Image: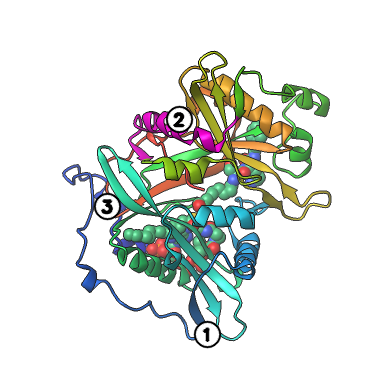
Amino acid sequence: RHKFWETQPVGQFRDAADTSLPDGPIELPTPLSEVRADPYPLPAAFEWLTCDLDDDALLADLYSLLAHNYVEDDENMFRFNYSPAFLRWALKPPSFFRAWHIGVRAKESKKLVAFISGVPARIRARDDVVRMAEINFLCVHKKLRSKRLAPVLIREVTRRVHQENIWQAAYTAGVVLPTPITTCRYWHRSLNPKKLIDVGFSRLGPRMTMSRTVRLYKLPDAPLTPGFRRMELRDVAAVTRLLRAYLAKFVVAPDFDELDVEHWLLPQEDVVDSYLVESPETHEVTDFCSFYTLPSSVLNNANYVTLKAAYSYYNVSTKTPLQQLMNDALIVAKQKNYDVFNALDVMENESFLKELKFGPGDGQLHYYLYNYRIRNGIKPSELGLVLL
Ligand code: MYA
Ligand code: JJ1
């Protein structure tokens, strides 16, 4: 059934019943001298390209490949439209490897036709902090689909990760592969219901009019919690402490240090936004919330070309109730003109989704680890990891 995935060190569907297999690496590292030294062969018309994302022309080519060929919903009405600034942020975290930004070009035209990337991360699974690659942005041009190029890209990124003496990876996909550690659902909170209905993202509920719907989703003009403000560079240490203590509660979560927090959570216009609550009395940072910006292209609509979506990222509440904190996140997203606020049912998100008028989407997101077994998997609420 899975000619490629059957050959890989991932949980196989047939092992699901075998409770004797231990948690942890599926196969041991091999000596670096045994890691294949040269790139896997590509069909003759194509060549590998290690991408320099500081090169604006190359970044524009990557942006365009993804904008036209990356992930769509099941009815092909919307397609993710990651911005160039977002791609640079996502692919250049602390200690990134340029060799893990892997393109495939047509030899003759030099056109970028496929891509896959990895970035380094420390991810904790139960008590074990593991150096991993986070694999993302796997894309093959629509005209080159179903030619088994994806397995070549995956083998090549694996080889380059192994060259750095890293033997595990984490990734997400909308498709079912062997074998998810957990399956999450997307939830959506309308901020601009009229536009969402006009583009077919949502529908008018039964016995609802447009004006009742607009009223239903109305939000205050400004955040309600005293001391709620944007995160700044001076907050990195306090946010790192909050986040580390919080993520310790989950079975699988990133192990963030201050450099990671500065990169992944310090606000960048139209890329990532973070807010916190600073106690007006003690000036202590007690709560934190964040979202990233990922618009989608609206395919085939006469009135609109893009949908501006915010995606819930990492949130920590110690004093402000999580529901109140996320309501303030919705308010700032509305102020900033987002059309919809999306969240997965990971971490403690279930505790506010229904109350804050999120509704379940038609999309699922499966989480995977490569060469690391977690027997029986975990629940979405046990997952403390959000990939972009
Ligand atoms: S998920 C986002 C993936 N991208 C898209 O969905 C964009 C639109 N689609 C495309 O560009 C193509 O359809 C892709 C497949 C490129 C997805 N993850 O070349 P093929 C398997 C893993 O003939 P194509 C993300 O970025 C499929 O089961 N495998 O197919 C995370 C089959 O294998 P098998 C996938 O449609 C990526 C084989 O590929 C996926 O032309 C994590 C068919 O190849 C998928 N999303 O191209 C990658 N889709 O026969 C794994 C299909 O066995 C990383 N396939 O069923 C693993 C860790 C590596 C590092 C390890 C380090 C230690
Ligand atoms: O956005 C998604 N679905 C939307 C649009 C559906 C359009 C028709 N298919 C959706 N809308 C309903 C919203 C409604 C608002 C009011 C309250 C009730 C709900 O459900 C879905 C997620 O739900 N997105 C996708 O399908 C995109 C792909 C998701 C897989 C992602 C793979 C990621 C790659 C990893 O790096």
Helix, strand or loop status at disc 2: helix
> Can you identify the residue that label 2 sits on?
238
Depth check: give the residue in front, 93 or 141: 93
Report how far apart the C-alphas of labels 3 and 1 lie in the structure. 38 Å
Write down which quadrant ligand 2 falls in.
top right
| Magenta stretch: includes residue 245 | yes
Depth check: give the residue in front, 56 or 366: 56
Helix, strand or loop status at disc 1: loop
Res 168 seen here? yes
Report how far apart the C-alphas of labels 3 and 2 lie in the structure. 45 Å
Q: Quadrant of residue 376?
A: top left
- Where residue 133 sits: x, y (%)? 38, 55
Which three-letter amino acid code belongs to the residue tagged 3? Arg
Q: Residues in magenta?
A: 230-253
> Can you identify the residue that label 1 sits on?
45
Res 357 seen here? no
Report how far apart the C-alphas of labels 2 and 1 lie in the structure. 52 Å
Q: Are marks 2 and 1 in contact (CB under 8 Å)?
A: no
Describe the colour scheme in one phrase.
Answer: rainbow
> Can you identify the residue that label 3 sits on?
14
**On the picture, is 319 further left or further right than 375?**
right
Give the farthest residue toward the front. Answer: 234
Which three-letter amino acid code belongs to the residue tagged 1? Ala
> Most prominent secondary structure in the magenta stretch?
helix
